[in-house]
Image: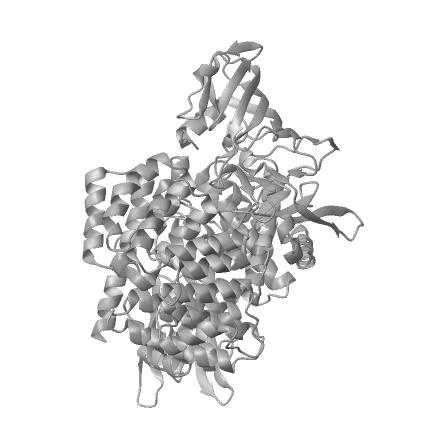
Amino acid sequence: MAGNLTRDEARERARLLTVASYTVELDLTKGAERFGSTTVIRFGCAEPGAASFVDLHGGAVHEVTLNGTALDPASYDAAKGRIPLPDLAADNELRVVADATYSRSGEGLHRFVDPVDQSVYLYSQFETADAHRMYTCFDQPDLKATFELTVTAPEGWEVVTNEAADAAEGGRWHFPPTPEISTYITALVAGPYHVVRDEYRREDGTTIPLGVYCRASLAEFLDADAIVDVTRQGFAFFEKVFDRAYPFTKYDQLFVPEFNAGAMENAGCVTFLEDYVFRSRVTDAAYERRAETILHEMAHMWFGDLVTMRWWDDLWLNESFATYMSVLCQAEATKWTSSWTTFANVEKAWAYRQDQLPSTHPISADIPDIRAVEINFDGITYAKGASVLKQLVAYVGRDNFLEGVRRYFQQHAWGNTTLADLLGPLEKTSGRDLASWSKEWLETAGVNTLRPSYEVDGDGNFTSFTVLQEAKADYPTLRSHRVAIGLYDRTAEGIVRRDRIELDVSGPRTDVAELVGVKRPDLVLVNDDDLTYAKVRLDEHSLATLVDGIGDIRDGLPRALCWSAAWDMTRDAEMSTRDYVRLVVKGAGAVTDITVAQTLLRQARTAVQQYADPAWRPEGLKLMADALYEMAKGAEPGSDFQLAYLQAFAAAATSDEHLAFVAGLLDGSASLDGLTVDTDLRWALLRRLVVTGKAGKDRVDAELRRDPTAAGERQAAGAVASIPDPEAKAAAWAKIISGELPNAVYRATLGGFVDPDHVELLVPYVDAYFAEIGRIWTEWSSDMSQTFAEVAYPFLVIEQSTVDRTDAYIADQAPPAALVRLLSEGRDGVVRALRARAKDAAS
């Protein structure tokens, strides 16, 4: 949002105004830079004579008419993106005629030209407050209204919005009014999209029309049947558990180019990152992630679209709920029945990392303005919130929880809510007072650590057993946890659970009397079954068991929890990096869950590159590459694991022998039985050769000629930026800071620039980063500037000087709070890496 709407401004505008309807006419035939945008808004004012303002970003305003009186278009404040509205009546009609600007940053109405066939594709992205980049509006979630659209588009285009068109002739499309919804979930997608139509049929015979869309040049790769299958499973599950029919008239899912996020829950018109249209072989982990995303956005149709948070303080009400419900649906209604294992290993790892940063915040956050919320789509808002909801379900009971949610929908349909509006029905259905639970879990920040502490006698029996709870001094809250303690023994069938004790843990020490006299197992697992949100530590005896035989743990969830504990201990410098990497190398081959396996391999590579003593790093990469090479050769031909091992091997290869094999796979002189070297794998192999100096720009250019697509252009941009040469880095940096790259190519170039294999080439850009960040933060759009702040930060220059330079910049320049947060997060990563390196060097 150009003017960065504050919470106080939004509250005052909501107190003053009641919006009834929008009638919007868009002309998409005016050229490549701008489009026509005419908006009529009908709204009431509680205090006739008062003044307010309406939002419009990047517009050329031609006419402003309020209640029949022409206002001066020059009153439009382009810097703030606002049109002042003086002397309002009790009932008002505002008409604004403007030309709006197409976006290349993925915000507002984004315009993309397909390099394959030069076709033009448009799509909107309005969260959090970018609807006013496309039409004039009161752009805040609690001023809901109906929206009626008329769109003029080139002949042969598909035009998709929140409602199905009721008239489409000669390139002019009309869409009937929507129900009352928020501006940020309105949508427009237009272009020569390929579409597959289907339906979801309920048991009573009624149907929901379905559409699956992608660019025409991707149509051959669109597996619409698989997408529709998950969609049907989701509708069947959600309509049953919510006991409320899907609230909109149709459900379109559109895979769009250069999307900045995974997906967006526009009402009845969901947009997705088109990377989910898989043009090359991917493992089942990618299909599982796509299914979770589909179900996450579908859950939003009820929680977020039907009932919407009043202000962005309660963003978590949308995102945490959708995350929890999507995993629940996956586990119970799709083939991915082990999705809670994925959740424990992926989502919760994200949450734990975010919650340990200096910028941690309560789940129910304090959001003073739009810029603050735009950096709050994070691991706390999504994954920690979902973890806490999972605990809440256990606390109040699943039936009580779902009945409370049903009442919430009944009471607040088409309205706006706060946290209290959700807790009220849950208290009534469960009979529990949730005030203390909310304060403890939703209104405080930080993550607790749980440790087992015990003594044993000469026979190996526990003589005492205590669960210790810790909290960081900055966030000292010790919470109440419902946990299970699992006792695991080595057997002929592997490491299996002998017994399980479930109890409440609170305060710094909780004695477990039930375990006194019990024989110590080979492995003690606090938080077995992943019941609570807390970091877990392993005692020395259990850690030894883990190092010797983590692959022997028979069940996936406890094995994933042990992997998570080991990773946490490594990041916290309680376990040396080389020990963690050796643990992964030894145990990853026994992991049967492909998502967990790929996560482990990524974490191990990160550990070597950032957390290992630099003197050990070459040995660590060789250790990984040697093991992964053998694992790839020994994997079942054509299996997901073969592909995962090979991809991880290619990313770690450094020796001449290994790089020769990589080159052989690329040119066809080497092979693995069952492995197809398809387009995306070719790029991965070539990227490694470029990074290691075995290939240059000429090879990248040749590969781009083989793959002259949008994805190929991004891959090429990243590869060229990763060339280990000062001139190549300088050229990439110049492109990055120019502000001229479209968002997807910009991200790819930035990703190649910060390749971790040649940190020495990044040292000169520490000062360059701090010289540019202030300008970029001020001048660029929110998403583009935030990406630069995070990714270009010199997090790979792991030196005390980087920390000192960051501190000096914050002290001298006093940047805005949102930027301070991102800088402090980057700084924390360097400090953490320095601690881990010191631990590793001392091992």
The x and y percentages for residue 833 are: 27, 62
Q: Nearer the viewer, residue 555 or 297?
A: 297
Judge left or right: residue 629 versus residue 539: right
Q: Nearer the viewer, residue 405 or 605?
A: 605
The x and y percentages for residue 631 are: 47, 79
Judge left or right: residue 721 versus residue 684: left
Colour pattern of the rendering: one colour
Question: Going 43% across and 59% down the picture, which residue do you hit?
Answer: 698
Judge left or right: residue 370 versus residue 429: left
The x and y percentages for residue 736 are: 37, 46
Q: Nearer the viewer, residue 566 or 652?
A: 652
Q: Quadrant of the N terminus?
A: top left
Question: Going 51% across and 55% down the picture, which residue do you hit?
Answer: 712
State whether residue 509 appears in this view. Answer: no
> In terms of image quadrants, where is residue 814?
top left
Q: Is residue 465 above or below residue 509?
A: below
The x and y percentages for residue 607 are: 34, 67
State whether residue 642 appears in this view. Answer: yes
Q: Nearer the viewer, residue 450 or 558?
A: 558
Q: Quadrant of the C terminus?
A: bottom left
In the image as oriented, which residue stretches furthest toward the right?
205
In the image as oriented, which residue stretches furthest toward the top?
69
Q: Is residue 12 above or below residue 299?
A: above
